[in-house]
Amino acid sequence: MSAAIDAVEAYLEDTADERLAEYLELLRIPTVGVLSEHAADVRSGAEWIASNMRAIGLEHVEVSETPGFPVVYADWLNAPGAPTVVIYCHYDVQPVDPLDLWAHPPFDPHVANGRVYGRGAADDKGQLHLHLWAARAWLATAGRLPLNVRYVFEGEEEAGSTHFEGWLDANRERLRADVVVISDTSFYEGNHPALTLSLRGNMYLQIDVTGPDLDLHSGQFGGMVQNPANALARILASLRHGDGRVAVPGFYDDTEELSRADRAAMAELPFDESEFAAGIGVPGLFGEPGYSALERRGSRPTLDVCGLWSGFQDEGSKTIIPAHAHAKLSCRITSGMDPHRTFERVRDAILAVDVPGVDVEVTLIDGMQPFGVAMEHPMTQTAARCMEQVFGQAPYFLREGGSIGAVASFDRIVGAPVVMLGFANADDQAHAPNESMVLANYEGGVRTVARYFEALAAA
Amino acid sequence: MSAAIDAVEAYLEDTADERLAEYLELLRIPTVGVLSEHAADVRSGAEWIASNMRAIGLEHVEVSETPGFPVVYADWLNAPGAPTVVIYCHYDVQPVDPLDLWAHPPFDPHVANGRVYGRGAADDKGQLHLHLWAARAWLATAGRLPLNVRYVFEGEEEAGSTHFEGWLDANRERLRADVVVISDTSFYEGNHPALTLSLRGNMYLQIDVTGPDLDLHSGQFGGMVQNPANALARILASLRHGDGRVAVPGFYDDTEELSRADRAAMAELPFDESEFAAGIGVPGLFGEPGYSALERRGSRPTLDVCGLWSGFQDEGSKTIIPAHAHAKLSCRITSGMDPHRTFERVRDAILAVDVPGVDVEVTLIDGMQPFGVAMEHPMTQTAARCMEQVFGQAPYFLREGGSIGAVASFDRIVGAPVVMLGFANADDQAHAPNESMVLANYEGGVRTVARYFEALAAA
């Protein structure tokens, strides 16, 4: 491409050894946020990043406190008229147990088979570190960045991002941006480059069915009173058809259907249903008719019971009519849907079931907005082009079934399109022993980000 | 009636003080079978009864060992040509906790308000003791009994009668009889004399629904796989209609409908539905249409979930698709039904529910035959007449919803009609603190049994 990019590439070529050494140095800091014995290490990690940011020429570097672990913030805002990008990664890592399953100590990283092994290599310190080097390469070669950047590196992602939304709210002013880049996702199976376009949201509720004051003898009372557990089963069964379609009135009303192009993109993904089913130990996949398994996961809402409890749960027999019965229920929701509106619809459907003789209560426990960016969005297409230039393959576009709290928060608070530009591999074993990052993905990541800066500025 | 009965009555009149003193003496022995610290006391109780039996002139007295606590056996078989009656009571009692709710120590019995207070006063040592005195009065006044009697006093009734059926099986020979009298039941509310005509049986099963090898993330997998908890709810809901009728094909096929006379007898029982509902804390009673609450309890089979468990049961949210889901289910069954046939029908209905993507297993845990004797049976009518002569009121005929293991065992092994001739009061607080026996019921019990001997011999 441009001469500037040529210089960046050359710089990156020359500094590969230094970069790798520094990457391993960052991995040696055991930033396990959920374990109190590592609290000082997590802070060391934040300081390490801040001092690296200062060294490479980023500005307003700050280890910004929260009631938990700090957010590391820095920016470079000297490109008036150019767009502004917010970049999000996290520097805390998962615990390492079971330690005995690690082939090498998790905080003594090493390189083998073209991979960097160590806790946090992929999730997410490797991805954080490649962003530092994309900026460094520009600043070292051009003395500037092609656009304005604000870095937001969280320290509590693996602990549920408890204080992160509060921090975003309190820092709205310095988060104004045209695009948010989140680097905490993976390529597709087979290490095929991929961009994640959407995440489902969630609505989580509890149902409490209350009958008699105490468990009753099923002989002395059976046939005289409603049974809360039978009533609960009746309620739950009424919420879903036998084929997996949700039966709640209006449930699908706000769901945005995928376009033909979206469906075509999903159909391109290699996916072997029976291999997938065997991998999780079920006889076959199952779900709403009319959609492929990947479409169901990525673009269709669900209604799943997450927990059930009532009465006697031990071995043998206890002949009772339970005094109460309970269920936890999760609805994954898709673009266009809202957790509160979904809650109201499901709650109304539950309360409409005719179960005389018991009291039914429904409580909202959690809600998370769905997130999605259009495949056709310029920010997405630009990222895809940069990825293809670097990795030699056009990325797949993925629609993920889960939710990432930070994404929904950014979407809500920053209000700019979010691009999930991640470089980990599908077999990175994040959250498990022997986590690794494919070194070529890491290096390609630095280059992709460096190009993305220029491409965004030119767009 | 007869001169013999006149003599018995006079004897009972003269010996009331001695009888009461002896009754209290028996109550002082803490025969709590389920607590190992009382094991020696339970054996003392058995010996006390055996020595009392010898003293009053019963024969073949034996403290007959089982792998648990002994059965106390005795007989008097010197009435050739006369019928033989087996009499069943139990000498073990419930534990006494919570002890601080007893107004007087449970094993220091006392008389107040026309009642004997103490653990076992009603359940079942008072009823056992009145049988000893019915025999004693006959033997002391006539030197004989009008018929042949075999006493079978169990020591493990409150512990589930674990070894009792084995003992009955091993003692078939000496249990041949024309009628079995079981004294372990109560009068009706308001202390109205009552005879229990039937008990429901039971069929208890477990359903295990198995899905993936491990709990799955409801975001990453929701919509792709069947959910075992949703599948279980679907299965359970399919087994019962919304109005309480069981939906299992053939479930009611073997149920014997009550005769018009039976229904008329049940309709006579005073029963206030709303008071009953308020007493157990439900807004109203509920069950199969077309039958009164007492008919449903006494004469109709049921299908009740006794327990449910799956996935996440704590506070808050955990977004999983549970790997498995389970339910315990009890069917109370009525005359004509068989626990194994009922199991097969319910199991087939469960396995017929179309829930692709999971494995469903159904396991029989317990089965107990229902029991019933006709209201018109001579043994029943004779007992009712004796009761009316002594208490001045014709007894109600009750159909109980629960099951008594010993009754089903006697029915099967002895093969003679069973008459449940009990004298406790509905408010006796058996199994609770401050258990009591109405002294007039106890005294009337002695007289009813004494008359029943003569009436059975004359029938």
Image (spheres, coloured by chain):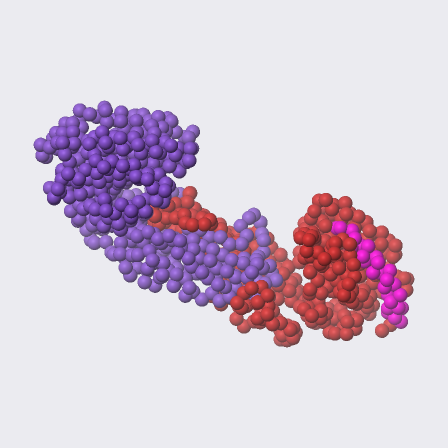
Chain colours: A red, B purple
Q: Quadrant of residue B48?
A: top left
Name the foreground residue: A354 vs B176. B176
Numbered range of the magenta stretch = A3-31
Quadrant in which the C terminus of chain A appears: bottom right
- Is residue B287 in view from this perspective? no
Give x and y (percent) for residue A47: 81, 49
Position above or below: A456 against B32: below
Give x and y (percent) for residue B29: 34, 29
Left or right placement of residue A436 versus residue B253 in this view: right
Give x and y (percent) for residue A332: 58, 60
Q: Residue at x 40, y 53 (%)?
A: B365
Residue A6 on the magenta span:
yes
Q: Residue placed farthest to the left in the image?
A: B3
Q: Residue at x 38, y 27 (%)?
A: B105
Q: Residue at x 57, y 67 (%)?
A: A278
- Is residue B185 in view from this perspective? yes
Q: Quadrant of residue A367?
A: bottom right
Quadrant in which the N terminus of chain A appears: bottom right
Name the foreground residue: B9 vs A418. B9
